[in-house]
């Protein structure tokens, strides 16, 4: 039997050398061995990956081409399991509004929002009736709302069943002197495609200290938005002016001469998390 095996190998070697290519069910073989039909391999397939070491692969691996004149290789596909009707975090990212060019001098030239005592919502503004779900940013602009440009970002939703969460954080400061009677109210909203989805009203209370500030943290969300690309943005407005000459800074020191804060300390941030029940699956193997 051993002699027969050796003779067969010699025969195939001579045949390949003499004929060039061998075809099975084809008269025009395109390779050394061209099988035009099903190929049944009872045991292992060994590959030379170019290093001279024969590799048999492991259970679950696929044979993958590496292109012309390159030997194929074994690859492992890592395909996550998806449970029915379960939400999965599909996308998340965070963004900041920071003037890196001038972080400690000429504060506020690019970063954040500043409102002087003339930039206040009109007296006719009624928060309880105007700051409602899906109020338009276009309309609220006439009420003194201004967007933080660096926090306007796009996100994509792939499923019709989704929950998108936003977390906005910033520092708000007033340019008050110690013991000033300054109880400045303000509002910040999170918008999706120009429609209000979250709003919070807050106040900087009077204090025995000057240049008082607070940290503003706000969480909002939307559910089952349409599939495709959407835009999230953040805008704020100064609502009251109890004392003239006071400037309000949102995400930036109240004035360029402020001594107790800088741009780095006051910068705004926005976090976006998109949870979905997966519905659309791309092919794992590209034909």
Image: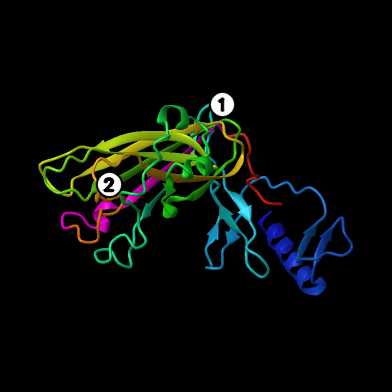
Task: Report the Cα–Cα distance between label 1 and label 2.
Answer: 41 Å
Q: Is residue 108 left or right of residue 20?
A: left
Structural crowding at the residue carrying mark 1, measured as other residues with C-alpha within 10 Å and reported as few (<14), some (14–19) or many (≥20): few
From the viewer's side, name the closer residue of 89 and 232.
232
Q: Position of residue 24 (x, y in %)?
A: 83, 57
Q: Can residue 231 be seen? A: yes
Q: Position of residue 43 (x, y in %)?
A: 63, 46
Structural crowding at the residue carrying mark 2, measured as other residues with C-alpha within 10 Å and reported as few (<14), some (14–19) or many (≥20): many
In the rendered image, the residue lying farthest to the right is 27
In the drawing, what numbered circle is on residue 71? none
First in residue order: circle 1 vs circle 2: 1
Q: Is residue 190 left or right of residue 160?
A: left
- Label 1: state its secondary structure: loop
Q: Which residue is mark 2?
A: 171
Residue at point 60% right, 56% down? 46
For residue 51, above or below residue 267: below
- Confirm whether the magenta stretch covers residue 263: yes
Q: Position of residue 8 (x, y in %)?
A: 74, 61
Q: Is residue 86 left or right of residue 65?
A: left
In the rendered image, the residue lying farthest to the bottom is 18
Residue at point 25% right, 53% down? 254
Residue at point 54% right, 49% down? 76
Q: Which residues are magenta?
A: 259-277
From the viewer's side, name the closer residue of 17 and 189.
189
Q: Which residue is mark 1?
A: 84
Colour scheme of the rendered structure? rainbow
* Pair 1/2: label in front: 2
């Amino acid at each position: 039997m051993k002699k027969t095996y050796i003779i067969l190998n010699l025969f195939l070697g001579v045949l390949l050398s003499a004929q060039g290519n061998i075809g099975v069910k084809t008269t025009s073989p395109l390779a050394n061995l061209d099988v035009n039909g099903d190929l049944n391999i009872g045991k292992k397939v060994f590959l030379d990956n170019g290093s001279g070491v024969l590799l048999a692969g492991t259970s679950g691996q696929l044979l993958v081409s590496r292109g012309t004149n390159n030997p194929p290789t074994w690859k492992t596909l890592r395909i996550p399991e998806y449970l029915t009707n379960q939400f999965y975090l599909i996308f998340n990212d965070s963004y900041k509004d920071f003037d890196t060019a001038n972080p400690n001098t000429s504060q506020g030239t690019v970063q954040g929002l500043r409102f002087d005592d003339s930039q206040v919502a009109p007296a006719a503004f009624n928060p309880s009736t105007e700051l409602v779900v899906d109020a338009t940013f276009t309309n609220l602009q006439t009420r003194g709302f201004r967007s933080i440009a660096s926090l306007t970002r796009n996100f994509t939703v792939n499923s019709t069943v989704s929950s998108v969460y936003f977390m906005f954080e910033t520092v708000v400061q007033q340019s008050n002197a110690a013991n000033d009677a300054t109880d400045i109210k303000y509002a910040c909203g999170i918008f999706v495609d120009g429609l209000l989805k979250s709003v919070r009203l807050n106040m900087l209370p009077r204090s025995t200290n000057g240049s008082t500030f607070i940290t503003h943290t706000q969480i909002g969300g939307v559910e089952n938005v349409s599939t495709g690309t959407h835009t999230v943005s953040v805008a704020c407005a100064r609502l009251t002016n109890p004392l003239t000459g006071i400037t309000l800074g949102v995400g930036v020191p109240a004035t360029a001469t402020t001594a107790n804060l800088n741009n780095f300390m006051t910068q705004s941030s926005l976090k976006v998390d998109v949870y979905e029940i997966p519905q659309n699956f791309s092919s794992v193997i590209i034909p």
